[in-house]
Amino acid sequence: MSQINDIIQDLAAMSVNGITAEYSTTLRDDAVSAVLPYRFISHRGAGMSASALNRTTFSGPAYELQWKIVDAVLIRAVASGIGVSDISFDVYDYMGEYVSALRDIATNKYVVTDVQIESTLVEWPASSDRRYDAVIAVVTISENN
């Protein structure tokens, strides 16, 4: 049986600079300045994928289930700053803390095999013309079977 619910709950509860993530099937339509930074894990079916790797072992066939999960944080509205110079430290600090926090959630049920972190501008929600400085992490996790 898959451990995806436990994996997502662990990622959401992971504190990065004091920020935990929201995860539900109904995410906010926007992020107002009062709730920024706003961290969320994409809801089921959006930005998440799975694959099974088949392997042959001495005891017979085995598989490894891998999940790619998108974990994003909207740091601030682009219009509220003066540019890259006043946000870059916050972004780099968040990225470093994210990697450190991932090391702390290791369990015997799954292992983090890859993480790709990118600082970017995000329009949230799509086609809203509201842009945010953001950090997007794509975390690859393999379940231990």
Image (cartoon, grey):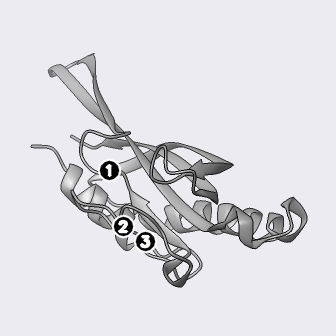
Residue in the image at 27% along x and 30% along y: 64
Question: Which picture quadrant has residue 50?
Answer: top left
Camera-nearest residue between 136 and 141: 136
Check the image and report above or below for 2 versus 37: above
Badge nearest the viewer, 1 or 3 = 3
Q: Residues within 10 Å of mark 1 (few under 14, many from 20)?
A: some
81 left or right of 40?
Answer: right
Residue in the image at 30% along x and 63% along y: 23
Q: Which residue is mark 3?
A: 14
Q: Residue 114, position in %: x, y?
A: 52, 41
Label at residue 74: none
Q: Find numbered disc 3 in the image and state the secondary structure of the residue it sits on.
A: loop
Q: Which residue is mark 2?
A: 12
Q: Residues within 10 Å of mark 2 (few under 14, many from 20)?
A: some
Q: Which residue is mark 1?
A: 110
| Amino acid carrying mark 2 in the image | Ala
State if disc 3 and disc 1 touch (CB < 8 Å).
Answer: no
| Amino acid carrying mark 3 in the image | Met
